[in-house]
Amino acid sequence: MVSNHNPVPVAIYHHVFNGVRPYDRSYPRLCGYGALTADKQQTYKLEVIALSDGYKDYDEVMVKIVPGKIESIFHNPANDMVIVGCVFNNVSDAYLTISNVIGIIHDNYDLDLIAGSQTIIFDIPHYQTGTYVVTLYCDGVAVDSKTFVKQ
């Protein structure tokens, strides 16, 4: 999955021709790298050219744009606060929740959609010791979650 904010490295492979058919993907060999930046979900046609003999092969790959992602949770395990970094793409509503492992929500925070990325500090000294789940919702759908431990 891809965020439209950052290019994604793409590995380009070709096949070893030691008696293996060119379309047999069980023997790939790395021959280079590229980058892909996408702003919408679509299928791309890839042309792969073997360096050894110039043989061309084609494949298709579906690139999906993720609506949002939790990039980091800092202070894990945590005592007094948790810092959550997240990004989101082309959404009309985004928010974070912190719940315990049973699903009881302890905190929520509406995100500023103009920024595209945001860092939120949650004060947690009043939380009981245990494991908690931070969930990112974009347009009402849970799109990512990560856990942290409160000591």
Image (cartoon, grey):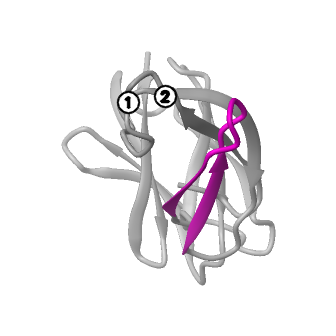
Majority secondary structure in the magenta region: strand
Residue 129 seen in the current view: yes
At label 1, the amino acid type is Val
Question: What residue type is disc 2 on?
Answer: Phe
Q: State the image coordinates of residue 106 (x, y, percent, origin top left).
A: 39, 49
Q: Is residue 51 magenta?
A: yes
Please say if 95 is above or below 85.
below
Answer above or below: position of 137 versus 13.
Answer: below
Task: Identify the magenta region.
Answer: 42-61
Helix, strand or loop at label 2? It is loop
Mark 1, Cα crowd under 10 Å, few <14 / some 14-19 / many 20+, is few
Question: Spatial distance from mark 2 to mark 1, Cα to Cα?
Answer: 5 Å
Task: Look at 61% across and 59% down and name the residue there.
Answer: 46
Residue 82 visible, this angle: no
Residue at position x 43%, y 23% in the image: 150
| 69 lies left or right of 129 | right
Taking the spot 50% from the left edge, 17% from the top edge, the residue there is 77
- The residue singled out by tag 2 in the image is 17
Mark 1 sits on what residue? 20
Q: In the orientation shown, which residue stands out farthest toward the right?
A: 115
Q: Which quarter of the figure has residue 141? A: bottom left
- Magenta highlight on residue 104: no
The percent position of residue 82, horizontal first and vertical second, equals: 59, 33
